[in-house]
Amino acid sequence: FHVFPNPSSSLINIKHNLINQDVQIIIFDLNGKIMLSKKEHIFNNDTPIEIDVSTLPKASYEIRLISDGFTIRDFIVVH
């Protein structure tokens, strides 16, 4: 998957290749604390998943996309 824009102060988008799957998106601070968790059902890969990060403090975070037994990780910066 691909997260953009990165860094961001408001919304991030997650571009993915998933079709007809339930996913969980979790954002962790660098100490491992869950800062945001969201569940989505993805019908197609045409529309990125949109996440509002405007309430998160300015920092670096790990973002995980979890679906059907696999986990994809990346890092984002909120500024």
Image: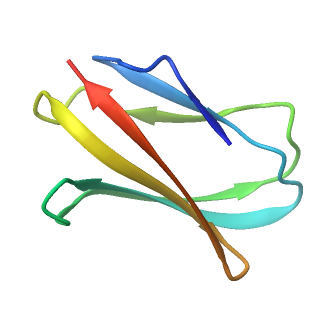
Residue 46 % position (x, y): 86, 31
Q: Quadrant of residue 38?
A: bottom left
The answer to whether 38 appears left or right of 30 in the picture is: right
**Residue at (33%, 19%) from the top-left corner?**
10
Please state the horizontal and vertical placement of residue 32, each as a whole percent of the image.
20, 66
Q: Is residue 13 visible?
A: yes
Q: Residue 8 at x, y = what percent? A: 35, 18
User: The C terminus appears in which quarter of the rendering?
Assistant: top left
* Count of numbered circles on the image: 0
**In this view, 48 is above or below 17:** above
User: Where is residue 19 drawn, in percent x and y?
Assistant: 89, 55
Q: Which residue appears at 29% of the width and 28% of the height?
A: 77
Q: Left of 78 or right of it: where is 59?
A: left
Of 55 and 57, which appears nearest the observer? Answer: 57
Residue 53 visible in this rendered orientation of the protein? no
Q: Horizontal placement of 7 versus 79: left or right?
A: right
In this view, the residue in front, 72 or 35, is 72
Task: Write down the quadrant of residue 23 in the picture.
Answer: bottom right
Give the camera-side residue of 41 and 19. 19
Position of residue 34 in the picture relative to residue 24 (left or right)? left
- Give the residue displayed 77% in from the left and 31% down from the top: 47
Locate the N terminus by quadrant: top right
Colouring used for the render = rainbow
